[in-house]
Image: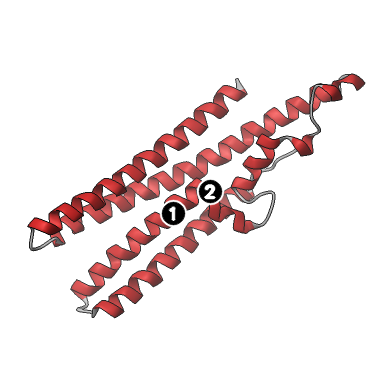
């Protein structure tokens, strides 16, 4: 049952990330086609970027939640293995020691609980956060250029700063959510 839950969570994560990446990719392709035939892209961009940003935030939050659920399930599986490992002395020939459980160790690394917190930069949730932060920064750069009548360089600086701040906020959220996961072996 735990393995089935683990598999379902991983499948959901892959599906959510694929839907988001497909939506972003499709939107960029549509923008490219529209730019060839339309003189003003502002209305399309004004509708598209917020929708993609909201989809990205929901996707990011779900990926973080699913990662934590997955870690809890893997921790429970690890405890079950530990129980069976300790039943008889000969059990060690059937069960690897806890520190060599590759699946569990890899899952811990995906949220930075095992090695350095920089490990969070390489998760699926962080990928979505990075792309979504870039979308948010680009949207605010376009808005700043139009509303505040900023030049291209200033609007680009605003967008880059906003993208960086958004990404840091995503990483802090991911760290805060994963910090409470108590994994016992």
Q: Please report the residue visible at 46 percent of the width from the left and 61 percent of the height from the top.
A: 167
The quadrant where residue 82 appears: top right
Q: Position of residue 36 (x, y in %)?
A: 11, 58
Q: Position of residue 3 (x, y in %)?
A: 60, 24
Quadrant of the snapshot with the N terminus: top right
42 to 76, vertically: above or below: below
Figure quadrant of residue 31: bottom left
Q: Secondary structure at mark 1?
A: helix
Label 2 Cα crowd, 10 Å radius (few <14 / some 14-19 / many 20+): some
Would residue 185 be seen by someone viewing this image from the given angle? no
In the image, what residue occupies the spot 74% across and 38% down?
A: 184
Dot 2: what SS?
A: loop
From the viewer's perspective, is residue 50 above or below residue 159? above
Q: CA distance from mark 2 to mark 1?
A: 10 Å
Residue that carries the numbered disc 2 in the rendered image: 123
Can you identify the residue that label 1 sits on?
A: 129
Any mark on residue 5, and which?
none
Residue found 76% across the figure and 37% down from its top: 100
Q: Residues within 10 Å of mark 1 (few under 14, many from 20)?
A: many
């Amino acid at each position: 049952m735990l393995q089935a839950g683990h598999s379902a969570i991983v499948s959901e994560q892959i599906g959510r990330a694929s839907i988001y990446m497909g939506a972003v990719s499709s939107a960029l392709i549509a923008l490219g086609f529209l730019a060839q035939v339309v003189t003003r892209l502002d209305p399309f961009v004004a509708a598209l970027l917020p929708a993609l940003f909201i989809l990205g935030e929901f996707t990011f939050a779900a990926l973080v939640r699913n990662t934590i659920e997955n870690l809890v399930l893997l921790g429970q599986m690890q405890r079950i293995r530990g129980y069976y490992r300790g039943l008889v002395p000969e059990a060690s020939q059937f069960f690897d020691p806890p520190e060599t459980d590759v699946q569990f160790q890899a899952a811990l690394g995906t949220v930075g609980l095992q090695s350095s917190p920089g490990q969070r930069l390489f998760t699926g949730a962080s990928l979505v956060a990075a792309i979504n932060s870039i979308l948010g920064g680009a949207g605010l750069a376009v808005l700043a250029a139009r509303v505040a009548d900023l030049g291209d360089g200033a609007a680009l600086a605003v967008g880059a700063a906003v993208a960086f701040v958004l990404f840091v906020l995503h990483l802090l959220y991911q760290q805060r959510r994963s910090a409470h996961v108590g994994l016992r072996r």
